[in-house]
Image (spheres, grey):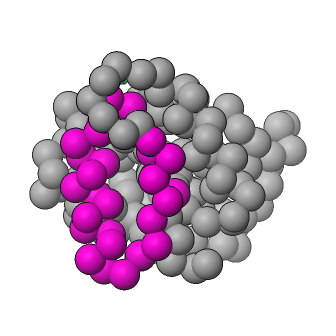
């Protein structure tokens, strides 16, 4: 499914995640929310694992939200084939799709306000990977040279 987005958060990103879900559903995206489902304290590496595995299995994009976005990005990037990008601005969001073929966007609810976060999401989702020399560099990451 081309417009499928897998999404997850811990308690620190729960509210922003819900704003993103509402926004993307209004735009017609199919959203799979893998939790958490309340502001009760939970562990971000577990959610990051679940989202990373679904992104790889479905060859689609994912979004992870925690307090800073950093814990989620550290955890998600442990999974081979995941290129998780922590973004706090729209330029980075565009470039990490165009040059890194980022497949998971990480956001921090305690860092980035909802309006900017939704702009980041829109730009990140819509920007196409440029391929070419950038594909060669991604291959080098996977070859672990
Ligand atoms: C939870 O308090 C917080 O540590 C988490 O949401 C995230 O910011 C970790 O990187």
Numbered range of the magenta stretch: 6-35
How many callouts does the rendering have?
Answer: 0
**Residue 103 location (% of width, % of height):** 57, 57
Q: Is residue 134 left or right of residue 112?
A: right
**Residue 115 location (% of width, % of height):** 13, 57
Q: Is residue 11 magenta?
A: yes
Q: Out of 90 and 7, give the one closest to the viewer.
A: 7
The residue shown at (34%, 19%) is 41
The residue shown at (24%, 37%) is 109
**Residue 42 location (% of width, % of height):** 42, 22
**Residue 2 location (% of width, % of height):** 58, 79
Quadrant location, the N terminus: bottom right
Q: Out of 56 and 25, give the one closest to the viewer.
A: 25
Quadrant location, the C terminus: top right
Ligand 1 located in image quadrant: top left
* Residue 120 visible, this angle: no
Residue 135, relative to residue 77: is it above or below?
below
Which corner quadrant of the image does residue 8 belong to? top left
The residue shown at (80%, 46%) is 142
Q: Is residue 29 magenta?
A: yes
Residue 95, relative to residue 8: is it above or below?
below
* Residue 43 visible, this angle: yes
Residue 85, relative to residue 2: is it above or below?
above
The residue shown at (71%, 38%) is 79
């Amino acid at each position: 499914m081309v417009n499928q987005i897998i999404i997850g958060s811990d308690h620190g990103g729960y509210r922003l995640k819900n704003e993103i879900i509402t926004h993307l559903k209004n735009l017609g995206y199919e959203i799979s929310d893998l939790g958490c489902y309340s502001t009760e304290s939970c562990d971000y590496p577990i959610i990051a694992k679940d989202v990373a595995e679904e992104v790889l299995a479905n060859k689609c994009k994912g979004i992870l939200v925690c307090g800073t976005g950093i814990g989620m990005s550290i955890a998600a990037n442990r999974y081979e084939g995941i290129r998780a990008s922590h973004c706090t601005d729209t330029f980075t969001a565009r470039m990490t799709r165009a040059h890194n073929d980022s497949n998971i966007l990480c956001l921090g609810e305690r860092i980035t306000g909802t309006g900017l976060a939704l702009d980041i999401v829109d730009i990140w989702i819509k920007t196409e990977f440029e391929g070419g020399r950038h594909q060669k560099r991604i291959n080098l990451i996977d070859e672990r040279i």
